[in-house]
Image (cartoon, helix red, strand yellow):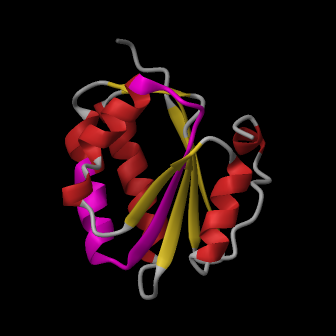
Amino acid sequence: MKSTGDFELWTTGNILNASVTGVWDGDIAKRYQTAFLKQASALSSAPWAHIVYLDKWVLGTPEIEPIIQALAGWCNENNLVAAAHVYSPNMLKEFQLNRMLAPGSIRFTLHHFNDVDTAIVWLHHEGFHAEYPKQVIAKRFA
């Protein structure tokens, strides 16, 4: 599978937002890991949240899985308390995401949402001031 993936990361308050696209391989996952850690480190002194827009993400090669698992482990140790995945129902995505972020391996609350609005409402209930994404890439997921 040839990689065609990309990502964009941005923060709004104490929320790290991500939009991901295409097919991911290990190289893209490593770039994401580096960028994620740089931005998340600035939030990690207090509870923070993460929202990921996944509708345009296709899938990843097996080599991305340990990289994403390592990021989840870092999040466990660095105050991530709530994570929202936003994507239309897709069994293959759900399968790969569940392999990477198995319930027993994470200590933060993770929920999947089919739409942005419901994810934002949930984050508000969790105590985070989430906003509708203004980024050009993220708008494609709404």
Please state the horizontal and vertical placement of residue 89, each as a whole percent of the image. 54, 30
Whether residue 12 is visible here, answered yes or no, is: no
Quadrant position of the C terminus in the picture: top right
Task: Identify the magenta region.
Answer: 69-91
Residue at left offset 49%, top offset 67%: 39
Q: Quadrant of the N terminus?
A: top left
Residue 69 falls left or right of residue 16: left
Q: Is residue 119 left or right of residue 48?
A: right
**Percent position of residue 74, x then y:** 27, 66
Across and down, in percent, residue 40 comes to 45, 69
Q: Is residue 5 above or below residue 141?
A: above
Asked if the magenta segment contains residue 73, the reply would be yes
Against 111, residue 67 (above or below) is above
Residue drawn at x 69%, y 64% as measured from the top left: 121
Tell me which corner region of the image, top left, top right, bottom left or bottom right, holds residue 51.
bottom right
The residue sitting at 61% across, 68% down in the picture is 123
Residue positioned 19% across, 58% down in the render: 104
Q: Nearer the viewer, residue 47 or 104?
A: 104
Task: Residue 38: say if magenta.
Answer: no
